[in-house]
Image: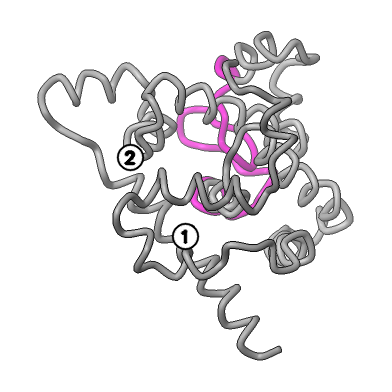
Amino acid sequence: MTTNLALANSRSLASIRVEHARELMGKSYHKSIVSRFKNDHDLERNIHHIVVSRLPKAYKVKAASIAKTIIEEARKNSFDPYFVMAVISGESSFNPKAVGPVGEIGMMQIRPSTGKWMAQIKKSKWQGERTLQDPVTNIKLGVAYLSWLRTKFEGHGQLYLAAYNMGPKAVKNAVSRDVYPKDYPIHVMKRYISFYRELSQKNSTI
């Protein structure tokens, strides 16, 4: 992993969010609803609320640890935590038991081969597929993989998002043909913007 964890931890989450939003949205950032939120605005409480409202009933007891993991892993890897939640929402609708058509597991829909590889990189314990069934571990490995893809595609949001869905080789092959996959990135970004709309509506009622 090339992320400078010490640097990330020394910066405020608000500054990380803004920087990442600019990376994802480019010139459209300034006119977007995301640009209105440059401070934390009860970030932790709001994320906890989102997690609680979307988790299946059996997992609501784990909402605090899941929300904390989203925030901590986003900070460590210099991601906007709302972006991490947008990926989770698009992949599994916050269902830790979700299983994909080609064997993807858990909240961030990680294939066991990818999970094992990322666990080796992070030097964390790997106990087979059941490792990915734990929502906290699943998020840690999923965010780590996103961070790896971000480095591989030099911070190009559309490409590293597409690679999370298609795999890096498929994206590189597409780009070599001057094709820039957009369906999955659009899918995630719509959810990302939606979280900020919810935040805006919530603040307007306070």
Mark 1 closeness class: few <14, some 14–19, many ≥20 residues within 10 Å:
some
Q: Which residue is painted at 40% across and 37% down in the image?
A: 161
Callout 2: 10 Å neighbours few (<14), some, many (20+)?
Answer: many
Q: Return the x and y of residue 60 as percentages of the image width and height.
A: 82, 58
Q: Is residue 20 above or below residue 192?
A: above
Using the image, determine if residue 85 lies above or below residue 125. Answer: below
Indicate whether residue 111 is drawn in magenta: yes
Q: Is residue 180 left or right of residue 33?
A: left
25 is within the stretch colored magenta: no
Task: Classify residue 104 by image quadrant.
Answer: top right
Q: Which residues are magenta?
A: 88-114
Return the disc, 1 or 2, that comes first in the chain's sequence.
2
Marks 1 & 2, CB-CB < 8 Å contact: no
Image coords of residue 123 (percent x, y): 75, 10
Q: Which residue is more in the foreground, 162 or 154?
A: 154
**For the residue marked with disc 2, what is the amino acid?**
Gln
- How many labels, in total? 2
The label on residue 206 is none
The residue drawn where x is 70% and y is 29% is 132
Residue furthest to the bottom in view is: 205
Tell me the number on the disc at residue 191. Answer: 1
Residue at x 37% of width, y 53% of height: 187
Q: Which secondary structure lies at badge 2?
A: helix
Seen in the image, is 186 located left or right of residue 42? left
The residue that label 2 is drawn on is 158
Left or right? Give the position of 29 relative to 182.
right
